[in-house]
Amino acid sequence: MELLKRLKNYSETQGDVIAFENAFTDETINYSQLWDYSNKIAEQIDKVLDNDKQPVVVYGHKAPEMLATFLACVKTGHPYCPVDISMPKDRLVDIVEASKTKLLIAIEDTEITAENKFDYKDIKSFIANGDAAELPEERFVSEDDVYYIIFTSGSTGKPKGVMITANCLDNYLYWMESIMTRSTDKKQLTYLNQAPFSFDLSVMDTYTSLFTGGTIWSMEKRLQEDMGLMHTKLAESGLNVWVSTPSFMNVCLLNKDFNENTLPEMTTFLFCGEVLTNKTARELQKRFPKAEVINTYGPTESTVAVTEVLITEEMANAERPLSIGYDKPGTKIFIMDDKYTYPGLSEGEKGEIVIAGNTVAAGYLNQPELTNDKFFKLNTPEGDMWAYKTGDEGFKEKELLYYCGRMDFQLKLNGYRIELGDIESNILEMQDVTYCVVLPIEKRGEVKGLAAFVTLDHDVEDEFEYSQMVRKYLAEKLPHYMIPKKCVVLEEMPMTNNGKADRRALKEML
Ligand code: AMP
């Protein structure tokens, strides 16, 4: 695999270069340590696991040992599932169970266990005392082997694991490298890592940096929660490449000093994961006139992103919403109706965005039915292409793709992907709840929060108290961003003529 070949090479030719820095704790790991530590952890993985390509769950946040652990897994032929500390205990249990893992590596403390478990102390001791030999390359994850599995919200109330292969990741990274070389002549760039490793946006910064021998400048949760300190640190960061959701950028833009005077080395702003508005792009172009603003689009199911477009001032100043970009090499995007046949709808016609090509995931882990439902072989004159039905609505115009929203009950809140059905299923598990609908609270077309509507098998005296109780219950099951701001208790659920909850009527109650 090209990525691992390059990492070995960097460990020899630029071993002292910092590969990853946690900007809050100032902990770092250089390319030589990254390679060496991962060998030492790999040696211990080999002692407890068979050579069976089963996934390893890695729980933690932004410690440098996370990266060494990811590498150790793939060097021993095992994909890893990153789980961030923002996941509550029950979600971690769901993931441990769904992945059927035989090894949980917990870089941060958790009482959850699997058949085997290494904690942070173990990892530290493997690194300090290990004397590992190089692992043979044939053992590494390669080609169609799964490299990582990222769990995203699933509509049934349980998360689903997207399997990204080594080939998907390499293909994605060649493309990202070409964007970076087009965007700047600078070598050894410093990349912002804002997203947790369990969110595939982090792959954009982390692996593009590792692939090209750069430095990842990572902001952990505690730094992102202290805006004053965050901006002070940013001003000292020497950052070149920004990768975040537009939501996070909007928070940063609240600080007037966030501009090219404080971040003079910025060359590129890369966005993905949700709508980039003209206003945000315009503001950035004003504050960083020498840097490029690039919009990218894609779901976790096709390795982070599959389109990109450099946003010109003309595009940002126009009335029309920004495009989400041109197909990357190796990918063909089609607009289709529910027949899903080649070549789909014509230029300008709205339909479902279907992604076909060399970064489409292998499917959902241990879920063949769901995989068959969403992934398929698309028959084209050039041969079959592996394809994914995104559930996004869009259209194409002069090769550019435009996004028109979701066709189902999935949404983005502050960049986080959420299935409303996931929250509803969890609320329905409460014994007294007889019906539940969760809706987004929107202001000027933007999702600002969530509201749950329930009917119960008893009366409630204090609705506020009940609402707080539901929130507390959910906090044990779901990550914080999936917890509704309020829970409205209804005597009766309004229904449409065809017997479904009347979401429009509910929306009017917000
Ligand atoms: P995730 O799997 O978390 O990356 O979420 C994928 C979903 O985010 C896509 O299916 C879209 O609905 C949305 N998305 C990703 N990129 C963009 C973008 N540039 N503009 C609008 N929506 C986006």
Image (cartoon, helix red, strand yellow):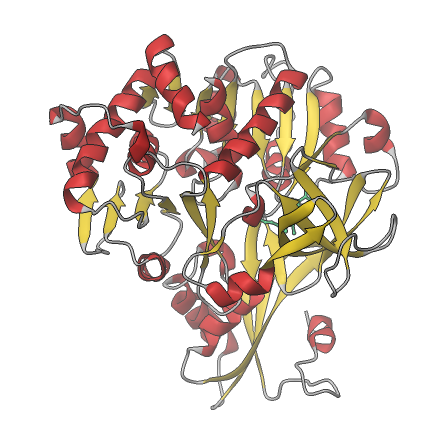
* Rendered view: 501 above or below 190: below
Q: Position of residue 249 (x, y in %)?
A: 62, 35
In the displayed orientation, state which residue is furthest to the bottom.
458
Q: Position of residue 351 (x, y in %)?
A: 78, 57
The residue shown at (49%, 37%) is 167
Horizontal side of residue 297 vs 29, given as left or right: right
Count of all numbered marks drawn on residues in the image? 0
Q: Is residue 444 visible?
A: no
Horizontal side of residue 356 vs 130, given as left or right: right
Q: Position of residue 87 (x, y in %)?
A: 39, 53
Quadrant in the picture for the N terminus: top left
Q: Is residue 11 visible?
A: yes
Task: Out of 337 and 52, give the one closest to the viewer.
Answer: 52
Q: Quadrant of residue 396?
A: top right
Quadrant in the picture for the C terminus: bottom right
The residue shown at (58%, 10%) is 186
* Rendered view: 504 above or below 123: below
Horizontal side of residue 108 vs 192, given as left or right: left
Task: Out of 417 and 286, give the one closest to the viewer.
Answer: 417
Q: Quadrant of residue 358?
A: top right
In the displayed orientation, state which residue is furthest to the left.
129
Task: Out of 138 and 40, give the one closest to the viewer.
Answer: 138
Q: Quadrant of residue 359?
A: top right
Q: Position of residue 131 (x, y in %)?
A: 13, 23
* Rendered view: 111 above or below 261: below
The residue shown at (64%, 62%) is 440
Horizontal side of residue 405 vs 188, given as left or right: right
